[in-house]
């Protein structure tokens, strides 16, 4: 059942034609800003992978990938959930050195995704990955990278507002860093999502760190696969969305697992069977480079910067009857 709710009195700041033009401006500007800030080169990426390779991301471990058989090979393929592992392998295969990275358009189908203002079954994001040294696997380096991404987002907003002065979005460049355990300590009687909303009201740009492991309560703030992010060196970039009056995630990212942290996280997650997969074997043997990377939602970013109330205003997808009716009643045009 859809959870779509359009805020009372909402009206798009842009016409549908202006919206389509502005989406292109956002994407071109942000790609340039991001690639310059992090020294990234654009590459091509797969829409599907061999499930036996271990390259597909299983997200929270419960989502079902879209799979199909290939006539000529007699084998199966899976539409990617993300490119978290593929990117690290690509950096190895392409011979990228420390300080060099890549970014790409990632398109995916997540058929089990709940539908609301922020989620659809279609995913489009910029996936990026960068080679780092072992010595750079630190909290300060992670924070520095987060600040660079936030600056790239804010620079893109500045460019958009010059073209469309009717857009009233305001973002804070100063990032507040907080761990999931600190959030639980601050708001022990709230859910993880409620904690984020409460914190972002006071700190409108934040990086919520250390996602994946269990907190003191025994609960997890959110799920993370055990085989790409290091749970001690990852997090989500969030802004406070004034249209929706809530915390708004635009990026999940982190320093990737080392052989040691992969070994630990596979054991903690009960996923030891993955040790025999080609990707995981290379990682455990220390053959893949140390990296940092993440995904930045393209539709999410367009939605935030163009002052939209629903993700269907900036992407084309399939919606349930409740979503379509709620948007129709509110005068919201779904693309």
Image (cartoon, rainbow, N blue to C red):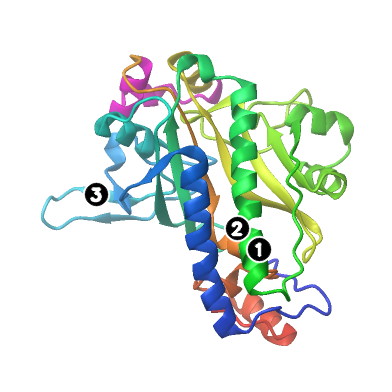
Tags 1 and 3 in contact by the CB under 8 Å rule? no
Q: Quadrant of the N terminus?
A: bottom right
Gap between marks 2 and 3, in whole Å?
Answer: 40 Å
Q: Which residues are magenta?
A: 268-284
Magenta stretch: dominant secondary structure: helix
Nearest-to-viewer mark from 1 and 3: 1
Gap between marks 1 and 3, in whole Å?
Answer: 39 Å
SS at mark 3 in the image: strand
Residue 286 picture location, percent across and down: 35, 15
SS at mark 2 in the image: helix
- Asked whether, in this view, residue 200 is left or right of residue 167, the answer is right
**What residue does disc 1 label?**
305
Q: Is residue 273 magenta?
A: yes
For marks 1 and 3 on the same chain, the one whose residue lies earlier in the sequence: 3
Task: Answer few, some or many: residues within 10 Å of disc 3's Cα (few below 14, many 20 plus, some between 14 and 19).
Answer: some
**What residue does disc 2 label?**
156
For the point 47% across and 15% down, the residue is 134
Q: Decide if residue 212 is in sight here.
A: no
Residue 113 lies, with reference to residue 76, above or below; the image says: below
Residue 296 picture location, percent across and down: 54, 49
Task: Answer few, some or many: residues within 10 Å of disc 1's Cα (few below 14, many 20 plus, some between 14 and 19).
Answer: many
Residue 122 picture location, percent across and down: 48, 63
Residue 11 is drawn in which quadrant?
Answer: bottom right
Tags 2 and 1 in contact by the CB under 8 Å rule? yes
**What residue does disc 3 label?**
76
Q: Decide if residue 261 is in sight here.
A: yes
For the point 40% across and 54% down, the residue is 105
């Amino acid at each position: 059942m859809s959870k779509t709710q359009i805020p009372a009195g909402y009206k798009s700041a842009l016409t549908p034609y202006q919206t389509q033009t502005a989406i292109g401006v956002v994407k071109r500007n942000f790609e340039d800003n991001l690639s310059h800030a992090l020294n990234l080169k654009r590459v091509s990426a797969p829409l599907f992978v061999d499930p036996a390779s271990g390259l597909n991301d299983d997200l929270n471990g419960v989502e079902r990938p879209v799979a199909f058989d290939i006539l000529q090979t007699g084998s199966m393929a899976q539409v990617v959930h993300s490119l978290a592992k593929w990117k690290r392998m690509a950096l190895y295969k392409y011979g990228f050195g420390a300080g060099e990275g890549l970014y790409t358009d990632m398109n995916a189908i997540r058929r089990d995704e709940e539908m609301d203002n922020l989620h659809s079954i279609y995913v489009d994001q910029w996936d990026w990955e960068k080679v780092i040294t072992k010595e750079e696997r630190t909290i300060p380096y992670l924070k520095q990278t987060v600040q660079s991404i936030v600056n790239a987002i804010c620079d893109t907003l500045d460019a958009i507002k010059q073209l469309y002065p009717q857009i009233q979005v305001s973002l804070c460049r100063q990032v507040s860093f907080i761990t999931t355990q600190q959030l639980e300590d601050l708001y022990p009687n709230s859910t993880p999502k409620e904690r984020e909303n409460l914190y972002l009201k006071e700190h409108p740009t934040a990086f919520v760190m250390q996602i994946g492991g269990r907190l003191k309560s025994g609960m997890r703030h959110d799920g993370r696969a055990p085989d790409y992010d290091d749970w001690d060196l990852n997090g989500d970039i969030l802004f406070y969305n004034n249209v929706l009056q809530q915390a708004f995630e635009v990026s999940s990212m982190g320093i990737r697992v080392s052989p040691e942290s992969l070994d630990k996280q596979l054991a903690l997650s009960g996923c030891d069977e993955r040790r025999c997969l080609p990707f995981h074997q290379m990682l455990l043997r220390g053959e893949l480079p140390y990296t940092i990377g993440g995904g930045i939602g393209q539709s999410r970013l367009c939605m935030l910067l163009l002052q939209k109330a629903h993700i269907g205003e900036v992407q084309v997808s399939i919606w349930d009857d409740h979503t379509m009716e709620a948007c129709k009643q509110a005068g919201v045009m779904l693309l």
